Amino acid sequence: MRMSIVGLAFSGKTTFFELLTKHGFTGAMSGKKGGNIGTVFVPDERLDHLTRIYEPKKQVNASLEFNDSQSLSTEGSGNSFSTAALEEIRRADTLCLAIQTFDSIPHPMDSVDPTRDLEFINSEFILNDLMALEKRSEKLRKVAQISKQQEDLLELAAVDKACTALEQGKALRDIELTAQEAKALSGYQLMSLKPMLVVLNVGEDQVDKMDELMAAAARDYPSLQFTAMCARLESELADIEPEDAREFMTDLGIEEPAFSRIVRACLDLVGLQVFFTVGADECRAWTIVKTATAFDAAGAIHSDIQRGFIRAMVLPYSAFAEAPSEDTFKGSAVQEKKDYAMQDGDIVEFKFSV
Ligand SMILES: Nc1nc2c(ncn2[C@@H]2O[C@H](COP(=O)(O)OP(=O)(O)OP(=O)(O)O)[C@@H](O)[C@H]2O)c(=O)[nH]1
Ligand SMILES: [Mg+2]
């Protein structure tokens, strides 16, 4: 799963990206940087807890890919994307939109105004989708007129419905689509259809006003998720001893580093949940879609485990947390069949035979 960090120039994209991909801040996260794409491990206290009890040789956190994409220009009319930015954004599963709220450096539009930035960027996504779909609609209409195929007609109807919404200034994630329409549109990599997390990047002097700033920016966008952080401050915290960093954070009233919150929010936003496997070799978090069955979960580990699936032994994390010991799994895990609907945090052992 790929998250793309997008935003205007100087909104703090690179500071944020580097923070995410920095090594060993809390011990729960480390990163691998390659160009402007990095793998970020998803911090998870539940997995840390399992590791403390099972003492495995290694712990493997779930991971997500982040990319620091090129800045959007302030040109407007749907033209604010460079070719590279377009490609990066289209390829992403989810967008992380960085918005400059700090005023210590000049803003590309000359004034700091998060609501205006959000409106501007949102309309750039909408206009871009509209331009892409209008072209497509023309071609499709010709094809459908000749072929009269049900499939082409359905696709054309979905594209036209999307165009109508976009013309009214609506992001596609805000309109109701049938499963068929969603499928017809899924191949177009539409930007305004992608889930988006808005990250307000606040100044060091605004840390105590984060909730206020967030509420103001979120007012007109009920379907978007909002979060706030001070990227520079967190980045500095990542460079000092974890002990000192914790103390510093307590003084500032920050309970949890923003990167943890944000990475977890991204996982949720792309519709993923995790399940755990435990043992002497490794304790590991695996990602699966929220609608996954035990059979799907087996496939996430290995096709052989799925092919030879006999049953899954499952213990909810909450049951482990109540009595944290290896015996809890042995004594209380419940036998489940292939169609069991996986729950976030399930601890699982698969019985299989190939
Ligand atoms: N005060 C303050 N400054 C910040 C913060 N985050 C970033 N900056 C500063 O803002 C400037 C731009 O930050 P970058 O992270 O390079 O922003 P960017 O979005 O990657 O910028 P471009 O790639 O040039 O578009 C740098 O001087 C940062 O040090 C923050 O949270 N607080
Ligand atoms: Mg940058």
Image (cartoon, rainbow, N blue to C red):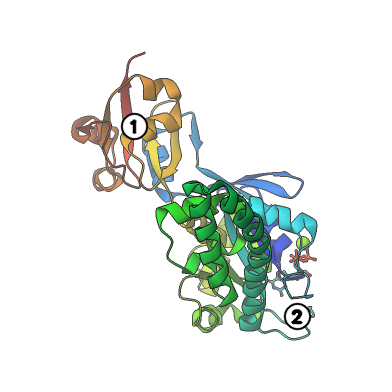
Q: Which of marks 2 and 1 is nearer the N terminus?
A: 2
The label number, if any, that marks residue 85 in the structure image = none
Question: Picture quarter containing residue 122?
Answer: bottom right
Image position, residue 35 (x, y; %): 77, 46
Q: Residue at x 64, y 74 (%)?
A: 123
213 relative to 163, above or below: below
Residue drawn at (55%, 80%), measured in percent from left and top?
A: 217
**Viewed as shown, does residue 77 lie left or right of 192?**
right
**Quarter-of-image position of residue 126:** bottom right
Residue beneath disc 2 = 104
Query: Which of 117 and 146 lies nearest the eye of the viewer?
Result: 146
| Label 2 CB less than 8 angstroms from ligand 1 | yes
Determine the quadrant in which ligand 1 lies. Answer: bottom right
The amino acid type, in three-letter code, at marker 2 is Ser
Q: In this image, 292 relative to 131: left or right?
A: left
> Does residue 228 appear in the picture of this structure?
no
Residue at 68%, 71% (x, y): give it: 124
Residue closer to the observer: 7 or 105: 7
Mark 1 C-beta to ligand 1 under 8 Å = no
Q: Exactly how many numbered labels are in the figure?
A: 2
**Residue 333 location (% of width, % of height):** 22, 34
Badge 1 is on which residue? 295
